[in-house]
Image: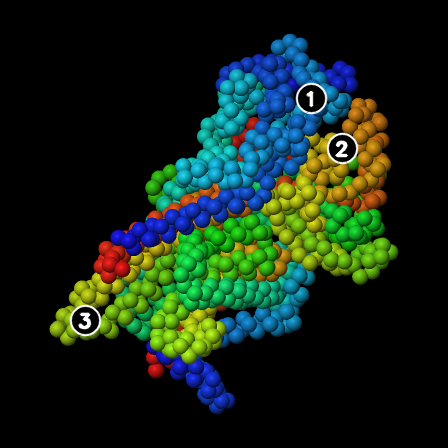
Amino acid sequence: MSYIAQRLYHGFIVLFAAASISFVLMFIIGDPVLMRIGDDATQETIDRVRQQMGLDRPLIVQYGQFMWGVVQGDFGLSYRHQEPVLGLLISRLGNSIILAVPALLLAICVSIPVGVISAMHRNRPIDFIARTFALVGQAAPNFWVGIMLILLFAIHLRWLPASGMGGETLGEKLKYMIMPVFTLSLLTMAYLTRMMRGAVLELMGQDFVRTARAKGLSPRRVMYRHVVRNAMLPYVTISGLQLGSLISGSMVVESVFSWPGFGRFLLDSIRLMDIPVVAGALTLVAVMYVVLAFIVDVIYTLLDPRLRRS
Amino acid sequence: MLATSWEPIDDLTWELTLREGVTFHNGAPFNAEAVKFSIERPHHPDFETGDKIIDVPISHVDIIDDYTVHIVTHEPVPILPQRLSRNGAFILEPGHYSELSQQESSRMPVGTGPFKLVEWVRDQRIVMERNEDYWGPMPNFDRLVYRVIPEPATMLAEVLTGGVDIAPVSPSNAEDVRAAEGVDLIVGDSLVRAVLIVNVNLHEAFNDPRVLQAMQWAIDTQALIDAFALGEAEQAVTMVNPPNHNPNLEPYGYDPDKARELLAEAGYPDGFTVELDVLHPDAFDWAEAAAFYLTEVGINISQVNMLSRPVWLPRNVEGTLNLHAHHWSAGENTPETDMWATHPDRPSNSTNWFNQEWYDLYAELVRTVDQDRRTEINHRMQEILHAEGGPWLTQFRVPLFRAISDRVAHYYPHPSFLVEDFAQIRLVE
Amino acid sequence: MSTTPALNEKSASDGPADTYRDSIRRVLRSILRSGTATIACIILLTIAFAAIFGPALIPHPVNALNLGARFVPPSWSEGGTITYLLGTDQQGRDAFSRLVVGARMTLIVALCAVLVGGSIGFLMGLIAGYVGGRTDAVIMRLVDLQLAFPSLFIGLVAMGLLGAGVVQLILVIAITQWADYARIVRGEVLKVRATPYVDGARALGLSHFRILRLYITPNVMSSLVIVATFSLAVAIYYESALSFFGLGVPPSIPTWGNMLSQARDLMLRAPWLAVFPGVAITLTVLSFNLLGDWLRDYLDVKLRN
């Protein structure tokens, strides 16, 4: 268990550092007073607001207050909205999950069969098509894919709404989701497909698979019993670690499709230098990462007894 | 309008007669009490934001009777009615606003207008309902929904597919709207000027009026208007909008040879190099083109930067911006608020430009109530700006392009950009 | 990965012209044998050619505006003209010329970022692995911190704070990449350090610098070359993504990301402007990925022999 304790300690250091970076951001960047009251205010007003916001206190006191706030989940007020940052961030998370979960599911549902089929028919046309799709999917920048989809399906063909989150019925709501979910999914889908294909190919060459085949088991049975099952293990851990690319992806996709989620909110806040929101998001993302990495570590430890001892 | 008449009684006092029979959205009556509360409110020491109405040196408001008030100022304010009609000078319901904190009340507005706030989903939509007790002519629709669509292209797609009824469109897309079926293009006049602002501290050359004049001659403003405002604007001479502009002044034309001559005369035959900052996203296209024109005569624009508001705001106050392009207006449409832009005492004046005669005239203008004398001072001040060549160059009032669906009529964008009159809209049956 | 340092050193120092020419021939043959690698090389050479010689060869100066010829469609469509092969933009500038010249800044940013990020990561990894102890722990916590955030997120925040600019962009992309190199180099260093060669060398009194140079660096190099190839693809994506959001290269400098950013608002008026820069990015990223795949196979095979 000392391994777990060590990982926990590392995670804590990361969180502490992330929160400290957030404070530095808040302190050195921009002028919160100016952001709040505009550029035509008198010096008198500026001084008064500075005092109200507690910006006249010594730095170390402000740091202490900030860190204590972070522990309690208090990142201060957004400059733009004058509301607590954490609430604003969490209220957006839901909308992002609405996109991210289907995107991840789509990626998984496509990548496993395509990866397996592609590997089984290595160097045949179907493999060629699957590999080309995966390579291009990995290379095409997601913001451009989004634009191309809007051009084609919303503007040219008029099948789907161009952007936003809307619709009254479930069917209408889904229409708004199709393009963003696909765009968000594409990179992960391509990556996981290539991974699955590689894993299956590697396993097919291994002794136990050859043995199973030599025993006269049907190729299909060998495939599902031995190859796919074994390929699933690294696949599951890796697909669980797609958090980072999903956050990055949602910043891009939500912005291109005007989807009111966490990613777009974050991007808007960065553009408008709403530093408390950016700082809060920084810490929140670090928390999500540390928690997820910790869970993955625990699973690894449980699966691999050698690690438990070291 | 909530006032039915307004008149100065003496240099420091204005008398306002208020409309009777008006109620707030929460049912409270509109009266002198509410006017006194609203006008004095931002002058209270606890009031948080530095809102514009503070610029007016208001002393206090006297209640004469339920529907008559006297607004008393510390100094003469000849343009008080314009000041009171701009964004920020709203009449608020005293009970509601004194009960709630500023933060809370800003999310639950209570006014007297034709629509009441029903729902506000941040960054998505604002839903308003018709106010059945509105004193003016009633709109013939029940609900008004504002939708937030950040990407211009997707907004346009929504207009063309009937998702929204009224939307701003960029000049580049205006032609498509004109050509599309079921949608109309409306071009509205505005008070907002597209302006290239010179920070005279940026380069020693800018202290020479000949250099500023050369920049005026260098840029084909008419071509910019034709390309980026679809020809729907006129070149302005100074930042003073009609009807207060000086009609005797002619704008600089396009004459690159003259520009090169003036530069050489000023001692810069080989030109010089500066950067250009763009402060307003809509200004980028014409600013990039203007940069090309300036580079052609030797004022080499090495880089065009697009700055977001939080980045330029502090630099604006410090006066450290490069040459910068902006879209700007004073909402009041008076000579003193228009020319306040380049006044040395304005905290956010980014030009660092100074002219003693102009400065003294401004001081006189803001105190002068007599209309003829005001016009005289105003026109002289504009002559100075024109002769100097700057510090504001290349100006045209940015036309407002709106796409409106055929089922909507009587909509016209408000020239100030700051408010909209949606009560005038009628749905076509 | 099973070569001994001694062998590696031999092949590196033992290089008369013949062997050198042979190895180049071998590499070329291997590239030609792999269809994908051939295609990748052709695309990358074309783009490199455009980046180097493009500005001298393009039909129109990149910044020459022509307000009378705005939004001319591509030459093959109705209303297009051969003068403007891929049409013109909102300033009446030639889209083809800008696409060609755009390759230059895009590649400069990506190459510099990978060079800077790779160097930082290489040094950090070397120090962490070789010195060990507390230094190692500190560097690895920095790596942890870096990996806790999605790179695009760091890039956007940092560029938001620094403001758009080429130098800023290079540094920011470099910073999002160093951690990968540091981890790989540290891992390799630890592996090599555990072999008897290094102990022997130390016993012989070789300086730390010589040990690093002779035994550790050559072993790490092949991994680094592979990672760097993939990072170029990633760097090109970041350059264009950050520029697309207005937080990369200043918008007046033509890069593919900037062109897409401006094209987005003109999707209806001029859809062609949005197509080609995206195709260019896709092809470049694809080629670097293919080249990386080939390199991985090739170096692996070579090492195994």
Near mark 3 (Cα within 10 A), the count class, few <14, some 14-19 or many ≥20, is some
Q: Tell me the element at label 1.
A: strand
Residue placed under numbered mark 3 in the picture: A208
Residue sitting at the far right: B265
The residue wearing badge 1 is B58
Q: Mark 2 Cα within 10 Å, few/some/many (few <14, many 20+)?
A: many
Q: Earlier in the sequence, mark 1 or mark 2?
A: 1
**Residue B219, x across and y down, in percent:** 75, 52
Q: Amino acid at mark 2?
A: Pro
Q: Position of residue C216 (x, y in %)?
A: 42, 73
- The answer to which image quadrant residue A54 occupies is top right
Chain label for disc 2:
B
In the picture, residue B422 is in which quadrant? top right
The residues bearing labels 1 and 3 have C-alpha atoms spaced at a distance of 90 Å
Circle 1 Cα neighbour tier, 10 Å, few/some/many (<14 / 14–19 / ≥20): many
Vertical side of B3 occupied by A158: above or below = below
Rendered residue at 83%/44% (across/down): B388
Q: Is residue C118 above or below residue B53?
A: below
Q: Nearer the viewer, residue B422 or B296?
A: B296
Q: Is residue A41 left or right of residue A231?
A: right
**Of the residues shown, which amino acid type is indicated by label 1?**
Ile
Q: Are marks 1 and 3 in contact (CB under 8 Å)?
A: no
Q: Amino acid at mark 3?
A: Phe
Q: Which mark is residue B335?
A: 2
Q: Which mark is residue A258?
A: none
Q: Are marks 1 and 2 on the same chain?
A: yes
Question: Residue drawn 76% across and 52% down?
Answer: B203
